[in-house]
Every structure is written in structure tokens, then in C-alpha cells.
Image: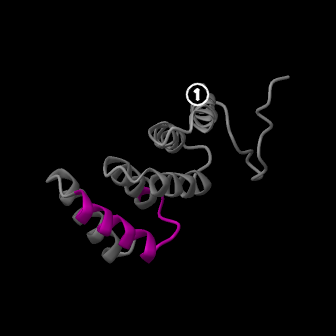
């Protein structure tokens, strides 16, 4: 991993631990600017944006995280929370359902990259 990326992420974590949410958001945003495929950066950015009450931005970051790791339960659980905080209950339930499927050992995306049909039989 890029040392600058590691440094910015650690700096963001420090700001978060100190309750300096705006500074943490700046650090995490810098991480995803350095590496747009950095899952941990997108996830952390979404969480801190949610804590700041910037729910649409948190959702955007959460969606980026789910695109990077579509079979990551944490990404879908967090996205569901972001949607709830923004009052988007139907979307929250859909993201939560994907998180539950993953918790049971299922997959949201097949190994070949195609999406699974999650509709009822």
C-alpha cells in the first residue's frame, strides 16, 4: 500500500478518535482521492459523514464501498444505516437484506461479477 495513503488513513483515525470529525472527513476524502479503489477509505468516509449528519454524502460513499466489495457484509450494513438516517426506509431495507444474505454465507455478486437475482421465488 502507498505510504501516503496509510499515513492519511491513520491521521483520519486519530482525528476521529479525538472527535475532530471534519478533519477526519478531510483525511478520508484525501485517501479516496489518492486511491479511488480504497474500500477502507470509502467506508470510513461514509461513517464519519453519517456522524456529521451529511447523509446524502454518506450514502454516496457507502455506495462506492459496496461497488468495490459487493460481497462485504459491513458495507451493506453501513449503507443501510446511512439510508435509515436519511429517511430512505425502502432503500435501507434492501441494503439490510443484502447484509443478511451475506451473513448467512450467501453472495450478492457471483464469482464471475454478475449480480444475483435476490427477488422472491
118 shown above or below 48: above
The N terminus lies in quadrant: bottom left
The C terminus lies in quadrant: top right
User: What x and y, as percent, mark residue 94?
Assistant: 64, 34
On the picture, is 94 further left or further right than 86? right
54 shown above or below 95: below
Crowding at dot 1, Cα within 10 Å, few <14 / some 14-19 / many 20+, comes out as some
The residue carrying mark 1 is: 100
The residue shown at (22%, 54%) is 16
Q: Please report the bounds of the magenta region as a residue range.
A: 21-40
Residue furthest left in the image: 18
Question: What main secondary structure does the magenta stretch of the protein show?
Answer: helix
Asked whether residue 12 is in view, the answer is no
The answer to whether residue 92 is magenta is no
User: What x and y, as percent, mark residue 117?
Assistant: 80, 37
Total marks shown come to: 1
Asked whether residue 46 is in view, the answer is yes
Visual colour scheme:
one colour
User: What x and y, as percent, mark residue 81?
Assistant: 46, 38
Q: Secondary structure at mark 1?
A: helix
Q: Nearer the viewer, residue 46 or 6?
A: 46
Q: Which corner quadrant of the image does residue 109 belong to?
A: top right
The residue shown at (31%, 69%) is 26
On the picture, is 111 further left or further right than 99? right
The residue shown at (38%, 75%) is 2
Residue furthest front in the image: 87
15 shown above or below 117: below
Amino acid at each position: 500500500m502507498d505510504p501516503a495513503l496509510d499515513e492519511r488513513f491513520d491521521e483520519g483515525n486519530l482525528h476521529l478518535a479525538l472527535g475532530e470529525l471534519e478533519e477526519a472527513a478531510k483525511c478520508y476524502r484525501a485517501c479516496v482521492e489518492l486511491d479511488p479503489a480504497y474500500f477502507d477509505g470509502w467506508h470510513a468516509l461514509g461513517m464519519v459523514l453519517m456522524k456529521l449528519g451529511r447523509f446524502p454524502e454518506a450514502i454516496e460513499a457507502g455506495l462506492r464501498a459496496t461497488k468495490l466489495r459487493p460481497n462485504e457484509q459491513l458495507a451493506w450494513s453501513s449503507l443501510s444505516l446511512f439510508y435509515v438516517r436519511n429517511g430512505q426506509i425502502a432503500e435501507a431495507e434492501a441494503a439490510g437484506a443484502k447484509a443478511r444474505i451475506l451473513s448467512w454465507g450467501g453472495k450478492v455478486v457471483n464469482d464471475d461479477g454478475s449480480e444475483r437475482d435476490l427477488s422472491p421465488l
